[in-house]
Image: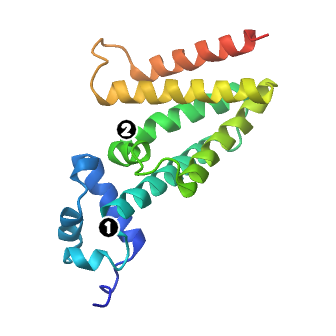
């Protein structure tokens, strides 16, 4: 069977992203994807290696999109301004693409070299931003983990509706980043 004209990986990933963002990652099935694309499920196998292959491609796509959002936010900025831009971009990405973000967290094989490479690009970007703080490599990696934990935790709690007190979420995010940066500056 020949591939449907106009059906390509970009269209498949965009449609899968739309489904994931609307219905959650579990809503991304080959049947649901085929239905939205107007094809029969077997037609998808011309482009992807089953559901596992789709999940891997979706995770890669999510990591690439997150990297792009972070890189665009950091361009032309340095120091605190760049870190704040990264934090805002990270949280905005999760707000905009909750299902796609979930796909980045649930890659079928997190040790897959392609997944590792895509994740490493985000770490490298964050490390470049942190150069302004003159940290040694090990301390900078701890800081990257800290930032990721902070951004992921904040975004996850926000997505679950756990911030019930009437305070501006973006003000809380700025406070968290400022507090973390203050601690980073005091690191011996």
Is 72 left, or right, of 47 in this rendering?
right
Q: Position of residue 98 (x, y in %)?
A: 34, 42
Mark 1 or mark 2: name the one nearer the start of the chain: 1
Which residue sits furthest bottom? 2
Characterize the local packing of mark 2: few (<14), some (14-19) or many (20 or more) Cα atoms within 10 angstroms. Answer: some
Is residue 138 or residue 163 the one in the foreground? 138
Characterize the local packing of mark 1: few (<14), some (14-19) or many (20 or more) Cα atoms within 10 angstroms. Answer: some
Looking at the picture, does residue 73 appear above or below residue 181? below
What residue is rendered at 32% in x and 86% in y? 3
Looking at the picture, does residue 26 appear above or below residue 57? above
Q: Quadrant of residue 147?
A: top right
Is residue 141 or residue 152 the one in the foreground? 141
Can you tell which of label 1 and label 2 is closer to the viewer? Answer: 1
Q: Quadrant of residue 93?
A: top left
Q: Secondary structure at mark 2?
A: helix
The CA distance from mark 1 to mark 2 is 28 Å
Image quadrant occupied by the N terminus:
bottom left
What residue is rendered at 24% in x and 48% in y? 26
Q: Position of residue 43 (x, y in %)?
A: 26, 79
Is 132 left, or right, of 17 in this rendering?
right
Residue 50, labelled with which disc? 1
Q: What residue is disc 2 on?
A: 95
Image quadrant occupied by the C terminus:
top right
């Amino acid at each position: 069977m020949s591939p449907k004209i106009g059906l390509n990986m970009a269209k498949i990933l965009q449609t899968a992203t739309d489904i994931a963002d609307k219905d959650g990652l579990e809503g991304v099935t080959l049947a649901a994807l085929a239905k939205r694309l107007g094809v029969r499920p077997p037609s998808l196998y011309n482009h992807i290696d089953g559901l596992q292959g789709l999940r891997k491609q979706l995770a890669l796509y999510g990591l690439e999109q997150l990297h792009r959002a972070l890189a665009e936010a950091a361009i032309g900025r340095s120091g605190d301004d760049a870190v704040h831009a990264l934090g805002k971009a990270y949280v905005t990405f999760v707000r905009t693409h909750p299902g796609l973000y979930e796909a980045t967290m649930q890659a079928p094989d997190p040790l897959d070299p392609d997944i590792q490479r895509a994740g490493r690009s985000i770490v490298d970007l964050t490390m470049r931003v942190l150069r302004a703080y003159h940290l040694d490599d090990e301390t900078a990696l701890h800081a990257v983990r800290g930032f990721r934990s902070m951004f992921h935790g904040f975004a996850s709690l926000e997505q679950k509706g756990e911030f019930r007190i009437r305070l501006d979420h973006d003000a809380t995010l700025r406070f968290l980043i400022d507090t973390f940066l203050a601690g980073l500056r005091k690191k011996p």
